[in-house]
Amino acid sequence: DQQVKQNSPSLSVQEGRISILNCDYTNSMFDYFLWYKKYPAEGPTFLISISSIKDKNEDGRFTVFLNKSAKHLSLHIVPSQPGDSAVYFCAAVDYGGSQGNLIFGKGTKLSVKP
Amino acid sequence: DAGVIQSPRHEVTEMGQEVTLRCKPISGHNSLFWYRQTMMRGLELLIYFNNNVPIDDSGMPEDRFSAKMPNASFSTLKIQPSEPRDSAVYFCASSPRGAGSHQETQYFGPGTRLLVL
């Protein structure tokens, strides 16, 4: 059973508009979350993270929101640019038996159209 | 910094053959991870090392898979014998964290795209 879920496999947004990528998790013990971005033929690269002691973290055009009660986080990109077109992975840190490893969602492919 | 280096970038082999994937982590990083990405299962952790010692290999799918890290700058993932269902992209990642630290950011290599015919 997936512990980190990204239910939208794809998202298409017009350039300049807001992109909202969603992620749900099932384990209430998760307390640190990361977003990774992946271009074709490249490895994922770290984008932004958030600790459970916060409900928002902002870095330029990227903001991650965390709703612990709903076990939900989202990544907002404003304004969206064509270069943001990539697959976005949500990940949670499992501090259980694996000493803090990442559990990834399956990813959402974002397409930003000019 | 060259980042995480993986080789080969692409590998095509026939069922039953041995496949060896290689990884050079970022210098100074204490942890190394092997992942497999497929359409069905997304990114799955196969095994991870901390200070060259395998810590968790519960994600390794079968005995056909093995991984080693003989030193801090090199790791291999071997599949013997390979099967068509092993076709996937295999990523290596490294992290600066030591045991007990909270530096969770992992830096990924470009991946090896494996096709087993």
Image: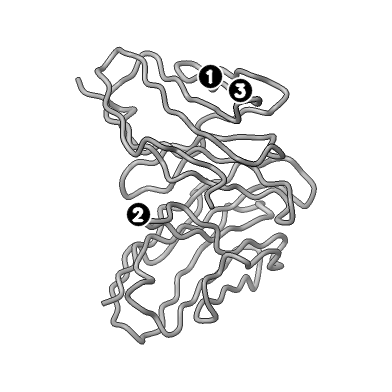
Q: Which element type, helix, strand or loop, lies under badge 2?
A: loop
The quadrant holding residue B67 is bottom right
Residue located at (48% from left, 37% from top): A36
Q: Which residue is mark 1?
A: A59
Please state if A38 lies on the left or on the right of B34 as rendered: left
Q: Residues within 10 Å of mark 1 (few under 14, many from 20)?
A: few
Label of residue A67 in the image: 3
Q: Are marks 1 and 2 on the same chain?
A: no
Q: CA distance from mark 1 to mark 2?
A: 30 Å
Q: Position of residue A29 (x, y in %)?
A: 72, 39
Q: Residues within 10 Å of mark 3 (few under 14, many from 20)?
A: some
Q: Position of residue B64 (x, y in %)?
A: 50, 81
Chain for disc number 2: B
Dot in front, 1 or 2 = 2
Q: Which element type, helix, strand or loop, lies under badge 1?
A: strand
Q: Quadrant of the C terminus of chain B?
A: bottom left
Q: Earlier in the sequence, mark 3 or mark 1?
A: 1
Amino acid type, mark 2: Met
Q: CA distance from mark 2 to mark 3?
A: 28 Å
Chain for disc number 1: A
> Which colour style is shown?
one colour
Q: Which residue is farthest left? A: A114
Q: Are marks 2 and 3 on the same chain?
A: no
Q: Which residue is mark 2?
A: B39
Amino acid type, mark 1: Asp
Dot in front, 2 or 3 = 3
